[in-house]
Image (cartoon, rainbow, N blue to C red):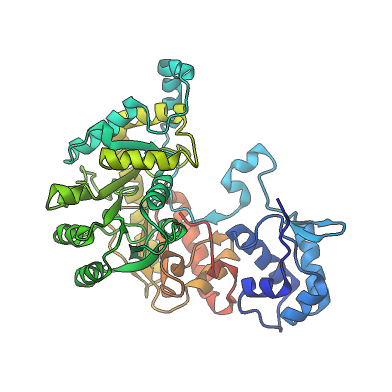
Amino acid sequence: MIAQRLSARRLHQLLGQWRGDGHSYHELSESIVLLVRDGGIPSGSVLPAERPLAEELRVSRTTVAAAYQRLRETGAAVSRRGSGTVIRARRPAAESEWDPAATGEVDLCRAAPSPWSGLPALGQRALAEHASAFQLEGYDTIGHPALRSAIAERYTRRGLPTDPTEIMVTLGAQHAIFLIARALLRRGDRSLIESPSYPRAREALAAAGALIGELPVGRSGYDAAGMLRIAATTAPRLSYLIPDQHNPTGLSMPPELRAQLIATLTAQGGYVIADETTAELALGHPGLVTPFAVSAPHAHQRDMILTVGSLGKTVWGGLRVGWVRATPDLIAQLESARRVGDLGTGTWEQVMATLALEEYEDILAARSSELSASHRVLLAEVQARFPGWRLSQAAGGVSVWADLGEACSSRLSRSAAQLGLILPPGPRFGSPGVFEQYLRVPFTLPVAELAPAMALLEQAWDGRGNARPGPVDRDSPVI
Ligand SMILES: Cc1ncc(COP(=O)(O)O)c(C=O)c1O
C-alpha cells in the first residue's frame, strides 16, 4: 500500500477545533489514536513533521514531539528512516486478545447481543450430521437449496407466501443492502432513508452515488404526515426502511402508515428495502412479526419491496449469513451484480444457518428474555442517573434513542471515550450536524455489565463540559 502523507493542515482539520492553549501531549496522542480507530486516519499514514504541525496547532514543538514519542511507545506508530512517524493499526497480538474484555474498553459502537450460547453445540451437531458438506464445491452465489427453503418457509409462516426462488443468501444484511443499492441505483438517483437510521445503510446508498433525502422518525413516534409528504415529493428510486424494531429508536412503524407509505414510495416505480435485521428481536413475549411487504395494497407494489434479513443479531454476528427476499427477476439481477465482488456465502456458514433456523423460535425466545432484562435495567439506570433524559418507547430491537435535553452528544461521546466507554454520538445516525441532542443507548450488554457501563456514562456526563470537540464527532465503526 502506498503510504499517505498527512499534511499538518489536514491533521488539524481531522482533529477539529484545536485551540493552541492548554493542550497536553497526552491529549494530542489520544486524539490521534481515536482518529485511527474511527477510520479517519488509515493505517500506514505518515504523520506531518513536528515543526509544521506545532505551528499549525499553535502548540510547542516539544508537545508534538512528546505526543509522537507516546504513539511510538504504545505501538500506535513506528519511526521509519526517511519517512518519519508512520501510523500502525493495532491488531490483536496474541490469541487471548481476541477477547474484547482484554482491551479494557466497553464498546457500544456495536449494538449487538452476545453470541447465542447454543453455538458450540450447533457446531458439533453440524459436524456430526453434515460432514458431507465438505465434499461440495463451494462457490455458491445464490444459497444452498436447504437454506433457501428454510428462509422461504419462515416468511410463509409469518404471512408472506414465499418460494425458495425468491431468496438469495448473502454475507449478512449489510452485504445485501450494498448489493441492492449497487444494482438498482445510478449516480444522482434519489433515495430516502429514515432519520435517524442505521448509518451503514446510508453509507451504502451514498457509495452508489444516490442523493439521500430523509424520512423523519421522532423519539416519540413517526411523523406520518411528514413522511408521506416527503415520499410523494421525492419520487425516490430506492428507499431504505427499518419498519420493525428500528435501529436506533426500537420503534415499529404504525400499521396504518405502512400501506400508504408503500403506495407512495412505489407509485413512480420506486423500490423499497425493508431491513428486518432487528425485526424479530422483541421485548416481552415474542410473536411472529408480520413482514412489512404484507402491508402492500397490491401485488405489483409488493414486488417492489426487497426484504433483507440476517442471523447477525439474532444468532451471531460472526455467522456471516443474511438474505434478500425479492422477485426471481430481481434476485437474478442481484446475483449477477454480486459476482463482481464475491464468489458466494461459505458452505459451512450455510450449514450452521440452516440448523440455527430449525431452532429459531427457541433462539428468539432466549434473545427476547435477555434483551427484556437488559432493557429493564437500562430504564432504571437512566431514570436514576439521568432524570432529564427522555427515551424512545422501544418495543424491541437493540437500543433506545435518548433525548439528552441539550446539544452535547459529541462532547459526551468524547468524554466517555476518555473513560474507556465507546459510544457513537447522535449525529452518526443522521446527516452531519443533526441529532447533537441525541444518543443511541444500546441494551445489548448483559445485565451484569450494564450498570457499570451506565456508571461510566454518568461520569462522562458530569465531565462533558470539559471534553473538547474532537475525533469521535466524525466517524466510528457503528453497527
Ligand atoms: C438495521 C441493521 N441492518 C443491518 C445490519 C448489518 O447486519 P449484518 O451483520 O447481517 O451485516 C445491522 C447491524 O448492526 C443493523 O442494525
- Which corner quadrant of the image does residue 69 belong to? bottom right
Residue at (57, 64) in percent of width and height: 417
Who is closer to the viewer here, 417 or 44? Answer: 44
Residue 299, placed above or below residue 50: above
Give percent across and percent down for residue 138: 47, 25
Give percent across and percent down for residue 395: 26, 56
Who is closer to the viewer here, 136 or 34? Answer: 136
Residue at (47, 21) in percent of width and height: 137
Give percent across and percent down for residue 207: 47, 58
Give percent across and percent down for residue 45: 71, 59
Residue at (28, 50) in percent of width and height: 283
Q: How many numbered marks are there?
A: 0
Residue 394, placed above or below residue 214: above
Q: Is residue 374 in view from this perspective? A: yes
Q: Residue furthest toward the right? A: 81
- State which quarter of the image contains the C terminus: bottom left
